[in-house]
Image (tube, coloured by chain):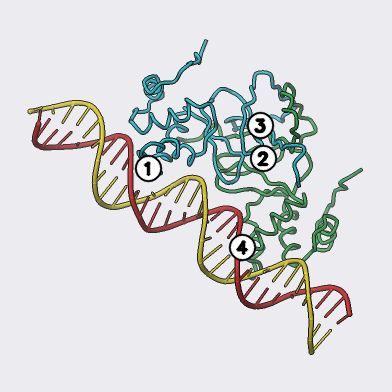
Chain colours: A green, B cyan, C yellow, D red
Amino acid sequence: MPNMEITQYTRDNLAEKLRAHGINPTHQRIEIAFALFSRHEHLSADQVMAIVNERHSETSKATVYNTLNLFLDKKLIREVIVDPNKVFYDPNTEPHYHMYDLESGRLTDIDAADVRVTGLPTLPSGMVTEGMDIIIRVRPSDAAH
Amino acid sequence: MPNMEITQYTRDNLAEKLRAHGINPTHQRIEIAFALFSRHEHLSADQVMAIVNERHSETSKATVYNTLNLFLDKKLIREVIVDPNKVFYDPNTEPHYHMYDLESGRLTDIDAADVRVTGLPTLPSGMVTEGMDIIIRVRPSDAAH
DNA sequence: ATTCGAATTAGACAGAGTCCAATTCGTATC
DNA sequence: GATACGAATTGGACTCTGTCTAATTCGAAT
């Protein structure tokens, strides 16, 4: 039974989670992890930075980017590329896909458990799949235009 | 039998294609269309610009972007968002998906005819699908690291 | 208290893409 | 051919996301 759901994220259990992924849990890293995991939203780097620096300015832009890339590297989070302007960071690393509301920019998870994809070609030899993204782009139907 | 395959793109039949999509076919627009359609590749804006200006500098950056966005708007081409750094423009507007080689940055089409996706949730009411992207990220298996 | 590597920082920088006011182009009219 | 006029194009400044670097600060171990 892997990936026991943590019902409530705290700085403490996040520090533990970081260590479990081979990441030295510093103040800034814990705050950034908390921003991502305590909400269940997909955040962009500048949103993370805004959240982390809400009270007092604590974390620099460089550290936010360093940390997000470190988290990616250690597979603590995933990146979602749906918008040409910015990358979203996704604390959910379980297999799942995304629905992207073009109007609001909101990104929603779609559980992969029920989804079946058939008829894909076999990979060229010497290639391995790193992952498959499915993005459903939606829009309000009665969009005034 | 819609979308009769054009075996050979020429400036002339591209001008016609532009008109058919409600686009005034100017020199620059024809050259940009030619760059995209005569190759069957996915090009980024700067690649388009390099191709168009190969012989003599003919087209400015602003025009390349204006034109690509105009083509998008008129559904002459599609954009493919797989790389956080740049958008690719795809002259193939038939339903199809993509395979993205993370190592080389090469993007390949996957025909959608054989692909079936089942188990997707129903859309929230008041929402319509604008499109579904499937991106398979691959990497050479014997990557030296 | 001192040390030392790791982490953080400010700010310069890079690259993609947008914006804008000025110019040029192409077509229509005379 | 000359003129007029709207559409298209242009250079260049600008914005925004993200990276880089050299200097500083942190924190754990001694």
**Is A61 situated above or below B38?**
below
Q: Are marks 2 and 1 on the same chain?
A: yes
Residue A57 seen in render: no
Q: Secondary structure at mark 1?
A: loop
Mark 2 to mark 1: distance in Å?
Answer: 30 Å
State left or right for residue A30 relative to residue C30.
Answer: right
Three-letter code, disc 3: Met
Residue, disc 4: A61
The picture quadrant where one finds residue A1 is top right
Three-letter code, disc 2: Leu
**Is B116 situated above or below D2?**
above
Closer to the N terminus: mark 2 or mark 1?
A: 1
Mark 4 surroundings within 10 Å by alpha-carbon count, few (fewer than 14), some (14 through 19), many (20 or more): few
Residue, disc 1: B60
Mark 4 to mark 2: distance in Å?
Answer: 26 Å
Mark 3 to mark 2: distance in Å?
Answer: 9 Å
Mark 4 to mark 3: distance in Å?
Answer: 33 Å
Question: For this rendering, which residue is in front, A35 or B67?
Answer: B67
Three-letter code, disc 4: Lys
Instruction: Tell me which chain the residue with mark 2 is part of.
Output: B
State left or right for residue B20 relative to residue A64.
Answer: left
Mark 1 surroundings within 10 Å by alpha-carbon count, few (fewer than 14), some (14 through 19), many (20 or more): few
Q: Secondary structure at mark 3?
A: strand
Q: Position of residue B66 (x, y in %)?
A: 41, 39
Instruction: Tell me which chain the residue with mark 1 is part of.
Output: B
Residue, disc 3: B99
- Number of the front mark, 4 or 3: 3
Residue, disc 2: B102
Instruction: Tell me which chain the residue with mark 4 is part of.
Output: A
Q: Are marks 4 and 1 on the same chain?
A: no
Three-letter code, disc 1: Ser
Q: Position of residue A76 (x, y in %)?
A: 77, 51
